[in-house]
Image (tube, rainbow, N blue to C red):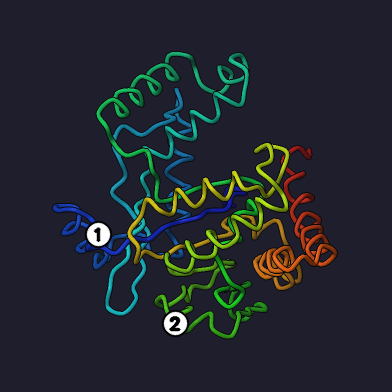
Amino acid sequence: MFPYAAYLRVYEPVTAFPQPARTLWTAYADSRRRPRRIHALAAEHREAARRLTSAPPEVVPDRESRDAYVRRSDDMIFICPWETRLRSWLAFERFRDERSAGVAAAFVPPTVAERATSEFERWKRAGRSLRPHILTDVWHVPLAWFVPFARSERCLMLGAPGTGYRTTSDALQEHAGHGPATAARARTLIYVTSMGEARRRVASALPVVRANLGEGAADAVPLSAGRLEALGRWLEEFHPRALVELDYGGLVHLLDDRTLQADESVAEMSVALAAMERGEAELAVAMYKRLLARWRPVRALETAN
């Protein structure tokens, strides 16, 4: 069972990477040994579980991962590096910030925590990038993540052939013009769009949200101008011809088939923003409430026993 987490990924053209990374990623994309798209998340999870269940736990790997998610479109290879070491540092930093020292020490021995922190500080002082290609959030999909996408860019796959396997009409064809969607026999819900569309939609939504919902406290307002600004800044860090992917990840195992089929979160967000812009407050509030009603019970499962 995968972690109950959703992922926002950016795939950059392989030509956007400097040498020698460009040559290495090109060879990697053609390698038969690399984890295929459908197996990549499981491979990531196995490696993380191995590290965290060791004694003492290895909260940050000693070396950066050499694996990546791969997409192809119009004879172009697109790469989304796992960047496991950087993402582990960032996640561990959030973990320590959100918990008391005593609670954090119960999970990670202080000596291990201090080593990880000092290594991260050296990384920062060396001027290395702190911008991961993958964002992760647990127990829900942040509402801001729905903004860069359109309903037509949705790919839903349920079950396995012979056991109620179903897919959206274009799931096994070229997905929104951005290369073949995974044809794997897996339960998944993803959206894929171009970086240009993602940036345009976020930029268009920002003044609407600022005028109607305000900046908002990050923990109190599910959708705010501040959240969208942060998302927009992250997207601007990448190549303009990149692809952006929203993956429901392990969250699909918290929702039954009927619920996933009825999930129109991206479409509801689009309608809510359009209604705000037109001044149709009742429609905007109705769509916003539908989004909250869908995702608040899922997020509440984090504290269930």
Q: Quadrant of residue 59?
A: top left
Q: Is residue 221 above or below residue 257?
A: above
Q: Quadrant of residue 73?
A: bottom left
Could you say where residue 76 lies in the image, as x and y percent from the top left? 28, 73
Q: Which residue is drawn at the image coordinates 72% and 46% (left, top)? A: 299
Q: Tell me which amino acid carries mark 2.
A: Glu
Q: Could you say whether the residue bearing mark 2 is in a helix, strand or loop?
A: loop
Residue occupied by mark 1: 16
Q: Residues within 10 Å of mark 2 (few under 14, many from 20)?
A: few
Direction from residue 218 to residue 126 in the image, left or right = left
Q: Could you say whether the residue bearing mark 1 is in a helix, strand or loop?
A: helix
Location of the C terminus (image quadrant): top right
In terms of depth relative to the viewer, which is nearer, 233 or 169? 233
Spatial CA distance of label 1 from label 2 is 23 Å
Q: Is residue 53 above or below residue 31?
A: above
Mark linked to residue 174: 2
Could you say where residue 201 lies in the image, as x and y percent from the top left? 54, 64
In terms of depth relative to the viewer, which is nearer, 65 or 272? 272
Q: Which residue is drawn at the image coordinates 40% and 51% (left, top)? A: 133
Direction from residue 115 to residue 282 in the image, left or right = right
Label located before the other in sequence (1 or 2): 1
Q: Residues within 10 Å of mark 1 (few under 14, many from 20)?
A: some
In terms of depth relative to the viewer, which is nearer, 222 or 154? 222
Q: Tell me which amino acid carries mark 1.
A: Ala
Numbered circles on residues, count: 2
Could you say where residue 277 lies in the image, as x and y percent from the top left? 69, 65
Q: Is residue 295 above or below residue 13?
A: above
Q: Quadrant of residue 87?
A: top left
Could you say where residue 187 lies in the image, as x and y percent from the top left? 59, 67
